């Protein structure tokens, strides 16, 4: 087995924990760890106190499922990724299987001992055994089997350790922790099988290889790192009975988490955005909490970097279910997010805004899609300490201003503490960010907490999503974001295609002024964009000025996109809802048609946005994007509308265009 590569001194965990995080010290600190985990096994009184209302949805679906055939992912489903790029056929069945198992575990915990629990224990046994029999725990989209051999079936002799494998290991670990004694009585031998499979498929590949890209040894650290490492911590704590091996695995997981935390900028920004925060930073927070609990506080997790991470979600809040979405993320928050976890951290750190926000987002019942570990924490800690975990429903903090210089993102609202009025989000950044869309210079504008000038966000993942043809996907293209297109040019891909800050915003003057030329392979100052919110007038202004090179056409070496002859530029805005282009110089956007609105009085009472520009400065071209992707349509409804303001260049290659946005009366 290979030896670990230590994280350099000075990283957050190495600095805080020192020798306590090394295997010999860890072995002592982890002695008796399971007895210190706050989620307690079956039979604890708290499981009987879980409110029926919090179990109702899980119980309803679990009851319907029990006795029916389990979801069965097949080779043909796995092979589809390699044949036609479809990854949801396989991943959807795997997810359905694991979510059914999660519901069965919860029902077994909630049931009384004896006859009432036995059918649910059998359901758990069947689901866990099916996972043990499943040829691969990795997702086809991640497995390297086809690249190595041309095979479209998993290679059981070379397990691939990815997000899917980590999720299965953690699920088996948590169900073993809470139901272990009952499983021994109901299905002797099953727990030994869980341990064997986890060791062969996850633990040994983790220790034997240092070429996993998600380790971050090359300096590129992304959300896979904490997601997998935190799941492996659970697997080691609950499924490894050898104290030396357990300590060794946990020590290497700490090294990995340390690389992730060291990559977080001082402002706590996540370049993958709000949606991926939960499966990146959020996973790191869960791993840190688990380490602290398991070691009885020896590995304390109150680190400075954590405070800024905890604040990120509420800083990206637009209103209600809406959040600023950059990169691969939907604009609506998923139902399965573990807000109780964030609430616990916020309370611990004394971040009142983060705590209020998380308390306001808490749902009545957890969703099995969150994963078994998150569901167990939500149910058990909510039952044992409801005043600390669930809190009292509060109002959203709706902070008036955020600027995160590391990612060049500004979020400013018209009035603090209310969604009423305008919100402007603007970003600079670069096109080498994780899960990047070509969106340097983009803006989002919301009225009364509903985004109307929008970022389409994440479509359904396929083989194309993370391959060489990624930017053939419309949702990733700059020409379908709220950015300019000099001579019809696409932005380039990579960190060199970036914005330059000319004026950074302040709370009193929320104005972000950027040089955008480099995003197109031009000189930075050949395109200047200024995005500002004027609270005094209740107006957003997006002002573009350009001075482009003569000729202005040719071929971008990076994107190989042919440019239109240098006769005009396009400035694009993507609108959600109902769009009406009126007389010269005005257009209206109304939220009617967005999911959550209706055609009756409620929709009619919603305010929209009025867009204005100087007549004659641009011709407006309207393109409707009919959404046949279920992820996009679930957020935006049946369509999005692209407004392209085409500004002719009448003399030389210089020009200007200004769009203002106001809330309609």
Image (cartoon, rainbow, N blue to C red):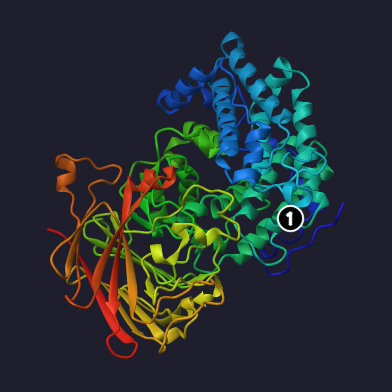
**Residue for point 15% across, 62% down:** 582
Dot 1: element: loop
Which of the 4 image quarters holds residue 376? top right
Front residue of 432/222: it is 432
State the quadrant of the C terminus.
Answer: bottom left
> Mark 1 Cα within 10 Å, few/some/many (few <14, many 20+)?
some
Outermost residue toward the top in this view: 115
Residue 402: in sight, yes or no?
no
Image position of 56 with respect to 6: above or below: above
Of 108 and 40, nearer the camera is 108
Residue placed under numbered mark 1 in the picture: 212
Q: Nearer the viewer, residue 299 or 406?
A: 406
The location of residue 69, given as percent across then percent down, is: 59, 19
User: Whole-percent x and y of residue 328?
Assistant: 49, 55
Q: Is residue 125 left or right of residue 415?
A: right
User: In the rendered view, would you say 631 is above or below 114?
Assistant: below
Residue located 42% across and 84% down the image: 552
Q: Residue furthest right?
A: 1
Up-down: is 532 above or below 665? below
Q: Which residue is drawn at the image coordinates 37% and 70% (left, top)?
A: 483
The residue sitting at 63% across, 53% down in the picture is 224
Count of marks placed on residues: 1
Residue 33 location (% of width, % of height): 71, 40
- The answer to whether residue 181 of the structure is visible from this angle is yes
Position in image of residue 481 (x %, y %): 39, 64
């Amino acid at each position: 087995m290979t030896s670990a590569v230590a994280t350099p001194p000075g990283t957050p965990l190495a600095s805080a924990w020192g020798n306590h995080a090394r295997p010999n010290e860890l072995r002592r600190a982890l002695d008796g760890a399971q007895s210190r985990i706050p989620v307690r096994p079956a039979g604890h009184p708290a499981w009987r106190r879980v409110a029926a209302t919090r179990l109702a949805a899980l119980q309803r679906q679990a009851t319907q499922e029990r006795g029916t055939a389990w979801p069965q992912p097949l080779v043909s489903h796995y092979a589809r990724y390699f044949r036609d790029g479809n990854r949801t056929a396989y991943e959807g069945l795997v997810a359905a299987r694991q979510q059914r198992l999660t519901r069965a575990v919860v029902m077994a915990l909630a049931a009384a001992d004896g006859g009432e629990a036995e059918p649910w224990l059998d359901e758990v046994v069947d689901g866990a055994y099916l996972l043990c029999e499943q040829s691969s725990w990795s997702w086809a989209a991640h497995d390297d089997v086809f690249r190595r051999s041309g095979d479209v079936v998993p290679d059981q002799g070379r397990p691939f350790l990815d997000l899917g494998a980590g999720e299965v290991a953690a699920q088996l670990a948590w169900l073993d922790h809470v139901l272990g004694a009952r499983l021994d009585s109901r299905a002797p031998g099953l727990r030994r099988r869980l341990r064997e499979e986890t060791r062969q498929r996850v633990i040994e590949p983790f220790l034997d290889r240092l070429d996993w890209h998600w380790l971050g040894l090359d300096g590129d650290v992304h959300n896979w790192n904490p997601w997998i490492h935190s799941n492996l911590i659970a697997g080691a704590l609950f499924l490894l009975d050898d104290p030396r091996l357990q300590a060794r695995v946990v020590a290497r997981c700490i090294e990995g988490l340390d690389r992730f935390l060291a990559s977080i900028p001082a402002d706590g920004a996540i370049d993958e955005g709000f949606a991926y925060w939960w499966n990146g930073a959020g996973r790191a927070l869960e791993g840190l909490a688990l380490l602290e609990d398991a070691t009885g506080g020896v590995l304390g997790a109150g680190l400075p970097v954590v405070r800024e991470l905890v604040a990120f979600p509420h800083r990206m809040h637009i209103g209600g279910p809406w959040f600023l979405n950059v990169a691969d993320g939907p604009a609506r928050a998923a139902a399965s997010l573990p807000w109780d976890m964030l609430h616990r951290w916020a309370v611990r750190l004394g971040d009142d805004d983060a705590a209020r926000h998380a308390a306001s987002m808490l749902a009545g019942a957890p969703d099995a899609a969150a994963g078994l570990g998150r569901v167990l924490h939500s149910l058990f800690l909510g039952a044992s300490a409801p005043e600390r975990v669930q809190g009292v429903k509060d109002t959203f903090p709706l902070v008036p201003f955020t600027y995160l210089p590391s990612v060049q993102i500004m979020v400013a609202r018209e009035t603090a503490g209310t969604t009423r009025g305008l919100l402007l989000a603007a970003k600079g950044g670069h096109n080498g960010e994780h899960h990047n869309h070509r969106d340097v210079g983009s803006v989002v504008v919301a009225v009364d907490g509903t985004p109307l000038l929008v970022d389409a966000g994440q479509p359904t993942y396929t083989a194309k999503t993370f391959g060489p043809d990624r930017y053939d996907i419309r949702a990733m293209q700059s020409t379908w974001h709220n950015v300019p297109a000099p001579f019809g040019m696409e932005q380039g891909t990579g960190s060199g295609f970036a914005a330059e800050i000319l004026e950074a915003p302040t709370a009193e003057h929320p104005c972000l002024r950027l040089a955008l030329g480099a995003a197109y392979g031009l000189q930075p100052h050949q395109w200047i964009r200024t995005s500002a919110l004027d609270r005094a007038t209740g107006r957003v202004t997006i002002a573009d000025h350009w001075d482009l090179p003569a000729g202005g056409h040719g071929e971008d070496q990076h994107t190989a996109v042919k440019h239109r002859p240098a006769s005009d530029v396009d400035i694009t805005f993507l609108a959600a809802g109902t769009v009406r282009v009126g007389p010269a110089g005005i257009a209206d956007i109304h939220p009617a048609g967005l999911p959550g609105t209706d055609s009756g009085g409620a929709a009619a009472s919603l305010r929209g946005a009025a867009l204005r520009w100087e007549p004659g400065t641009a011709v407006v071209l309207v393109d409707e994007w009919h959404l046949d992707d279920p992820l996009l349509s679930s957020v935006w409804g049946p369509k999005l509308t692209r407004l392209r303001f085409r500004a002719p260049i009448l003399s030389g290659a210089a020009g200007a265009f200004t769009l203002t946005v106001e809330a309609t009366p």
